[in-house]
Image: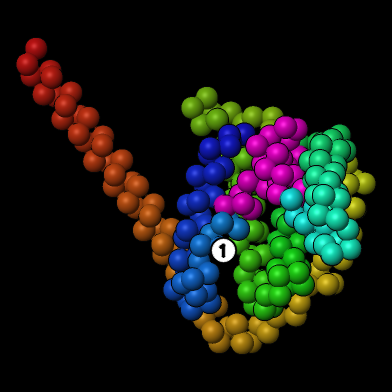
Amino acid sequence: MANFQTHLNGGIFVSVATVLGLHGAGLVEQGATLGYFALGVAGSLLPDIDADASKPVRAFFNVLGVAVAFAMTLPLIGKFLPLEVALIWVGVFLCVRYLIIEIFTRATVHRGIWHSWLGIAAAALATVNIAHWTMDRSAESAWIAGLMVGIGYLTHLVLDELYSVDLLNSRVKRSFGTALKPFSLTDPRSSLGMLAVVVALAWFSPALDWGLLWADGLPGVAVDAADRLVEAFGEMVDGTGLLLQSLIDWIRTGAAHL
């Protein structure tokens, strides 16, 4: 499987290409590109929240603990003493950061339901609902946010599958097929539970005017993003070719002086 740095690099690469494509199609304003880029990168790290004590797990529950603590204590300001509110905030944060994370890690298995198509749908739809209902974003903006998380999430799973194939030894590792799967074959209950979550999130997601979005330039998004990916890949290939040529010239020069 790919390591953390590989997932991070892949998420950055794909997120940049996607955001530039969306911006070029007129669907994302320049001031919002950084936020969408961050969502894409976050999505590329999100599947590993089912890995015990991984960096994404700790970071996710740190952020979740802060968010839940503020959500629960802000309404209490003015009703309790500042010290009491502060103690409640700390208690809620510690509960999420250490108790909830312990329950979560015990209840989940790495390469389980979070490494599946259902996991992609759940993460993307959760982002859509959070952006629209709690952050007061428009339906279009919320769906673009969900799209970025979904693309980043998919990038992670694809990299895991690619790293399951050993090209040098011409063999396929046992982990092949455990990341990019429709649902968890080994745990039907978690699959049914995640399916229920996806259905519920889809039900509450804001309606999107696809006709308006299409008129705004949706057909050009995929083309722009693909063009930028091909261009970036071409530059990488050209750079690799120059590096190899320089290495060959250096070897020839050294051999000539022997």
Q: Is residue 45 part of the magenta span, yes or no? A: yes
Observer-nearest of 39 and 147: 39
Q: Secondary structure at mark 1?
A: helix
Sort mark 1 into few (<14), some (14-19) or many (20+) by Cα contacts within 10 Å: many
Q: Residue at x 39, y 52 (%)?
A: 233
Instruction: Give the vertical position of 159 relative to 121 (above or below).
Output: above
Given the current orientation, which residue lies at the most extreme right position?
189
Q: Residue at x 36, y 58 (%)?
A: 231
Magenta segment boundaries in residue numbering: 41-65
Q: Quadrant of the C terminus?
A: top left
Side of 242 relative to 4 (left or right) = left
The residue that mark 1 highlights is 36
Q: Residue furthest top?
A: 258
Quadrant of the rendered image containing residue 59: top right
Image x and y of residue 238, in percent: 28, 47
Dominant secondary structure of the magenta stretch? helix
Q: Where does residue 51 sit, x and y in percent of width and height?
A: 73, 35
